[in-house]
Amino acid sequence: PLVTEGSLQQPTSGDGSWECLSLLQAMWCYTVVGSFSDSMDRAQKTPTFCSAQNVWDPGLLDTAVEMLEQLMCILATIGVTLQAQMWKSNVASNKPGQGDTFEFLWWGLCDSIRRTVLATHALLVLWQYTRSSSPGSQGALPSLGMPLISAGFSSAAWKNVMTLELPAVAAVFEADNVTQWRQMHSKNQWRADQPPLNLATFMQYRPLPNKENSDIPFSITSYFHQHDEFTNICMSTLFGLTESCRRSSLFRPRVAIFQSVYSSCIDPVLACSPH
């Protein structure tokens, strides 16, 4: 593997979590920029963009995507470990009067982990979808719940990606200050008697082919009336472009919106796909 947990600091420490989070976010950006830059006509680029492309080797793109998947699994493992600790930090603020601020900042790190894993998962699905749907490709469409890029990944290694909690709803994430965040966070706490809020749970409630599922818990459907557009587009990608869940009524309205956006902006990715 390109990256191992041993190469990072103590993973559930603040520094270790930030380190892995930053690495994954940087690799996410490099992968996107590399994918789109290779398909753009040089005449349409600015001098700065051309200079940036000179240091990007198109041959590194496949390796970058593999590393992206590995880093995502490591960050998901860190997230699931923190999740088992009820997202509590092992370190408390030692500055008087700053306990609420520290808790707010720590929660921001935790939700950034959840959002970064979700965004990376969606990007990998999009990448695999473009490769499998390109003219002449013999590859299968991506399947939700299974490794997407590296053949060496086991389904067990992918479990943390599927069981990591989904991001907080918009009212919590978009809170302007500590007081508002605390109010919204308390109001939107997930109860212990509700199904876990993760991708694995959503897969359990997906409809079977040609059969709608009317038993989806209200707590799950209500999540989609409260989350922000970031989560919306990530979930639409994950459930709209994977073979196993494309007929889900839970995601159909969002998939329709996503497909209109997808058709208008995905040509550059298709153009640079090796297939």
Image: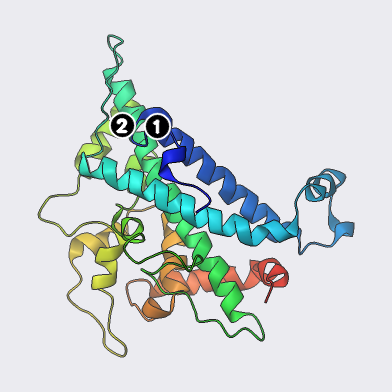
Q: Which residue is mark 1?
A: 176
Q: Is residue 50 left or right of residue 162?
A: right
Q: Which residue is mark 2?
A: 180
Residue drawn at (68%, 53%) of the image: 33
Dot 1, crowdedness within 10 Å: few (<14), some or many (≥20)?
Answer: few
Residue drawn at (59%, 73%) of the image: 130
Outermost residue on the left side: it is 193
Q: Nearer the viewer, residue 208 or 17?
A: 17
Residue drawn at (32%, 59%) of the image: 225
Please report contact status of discs 2 and 1: CB closer than 8 Å, yes or no.
Answer: yes
**Quadrant of the drawing holding the C terminus:** bottom right
Residue drawn at (55%, 59%) of the image: 66
SS state under label 1? loop
- Alpha-carbon distance for marks 2 and 1? 7 Å
- Residue type, label 1: Asp
Q: Nearer the viewer, residue 77 or 35?
A: 77
